[in-house]
Image (cartoon, grey):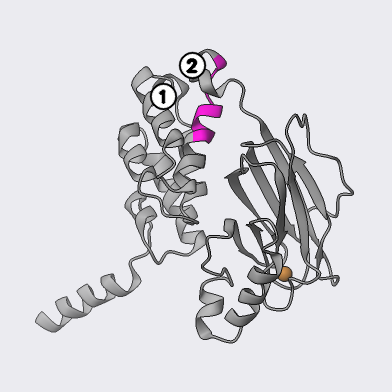
Amino acid sequence: MLVAIFICIAMMKCSNPPENCAGLDSATASQSERRTAIDACAAEAKQKPLDYFLERVGQLRLHDSRSDSYGDLIAAWNPDDLSQTAIVAKLFAVYKNEATSADARVVALRAIAALPMDKRPADLLPIEQVTVEISTLPSQMAYDRKEFTVAPGSLVHLILHNPDALEHNFLLVSPNALAEIGLAGDRMGQTPEGKVKEFVPTSKKVLAVLGLVSPGKSKSLWFIAPTKPATYPYVCTYPSHWRTMNGKMRVVANVVAPIPEQKGEKIK
Ligand SMILES: [Cu+2]
């Protein structure tokens, strides 16, 4: 009997899938497990106050894979609750706090962008929002877009489609850091941890991360564009891909819309 209890406890500890909302905070969950958790959170949302989730947003780490899930949940919250003065003030405080991780700030900005204009903080009228879709080019080790342009501080929703037979990721990096980060990705290919970390080097020059996308799949990433006008490279850091699989995000003041580029095949 005692042995059976021990085995049972051990199994719970070993598997621990985030099949409920609390699983969203699991440090070891896969992307699909997080998706399951966020669906559970959405179902639980009626029983939990918005504050419950806002508190967790403040704890998001840099390049935290939970960020998009929290962003999806909170931006889709009941507008009447989301637009309460106290909630808007909390969201604005997270967004303005430079000491908070970029991940927490983007979740807050997404929620504010979801509010009606008359409920938004005066500093955030309007919010420049842009959706950028990029596809990998099958068998060419390249993205279909070599560049795009956004306004400083824009809220960017980037969607990466991968119709190629290989895995690819997308990292936005500091100006002139393409080779440094690309080479760091190559070195990660020589260690077992490289794949676990999805070939994302630990560096302050990595500004935004969309992890590995499997063949035939798509993933999305929300980030806030830098406020400093400059050219920011983006790159796939899967070992040896970076030399051809890269592009440039230009941050330019007074941009109305991204410059249209040739689009590749899309995955439905
Ligand atoms: Cu790649």
Q: Under tag 1, what secondary structure?
A: helix
Q: Identity of the amino acid at label 1?
A: Val
Q: Position of residue 229 (x, y in %)?
A: 69, 41
Cβ–Cβ under 8 Å for marks 2 and 1:
yes
Q: Position of residue 96 (x, y in %)?
A: 45, 34
At horizontal 86% and vertical 49% (from top left) the residue drawn is: 263
- Ligand number 1: quarter of image: bottom right
Q: Is residue 1 visible?
A: no
Query: Is the CB of mark 2 within 8 Å of ligand 1?
Result: no
Residue behind mark 2 = 119
Q: Which residues are magenta?
A: 109-117
Question: Does residue 8 lie above or below 148 as drawn?
Answer: below
Magenta segment includes 115: yes
Question: Does residue 76 lie above or below 176 as drawn?
Answer: above
At horizontal 60% and vertical 50% (from top left) the residue drawn is: 221
The label on residue 88 is 1
Q: Quadrant of residue 244?
A: bottom right
Q: Is residue 232 visible?
A: yes
Furthest residue toward right: 262
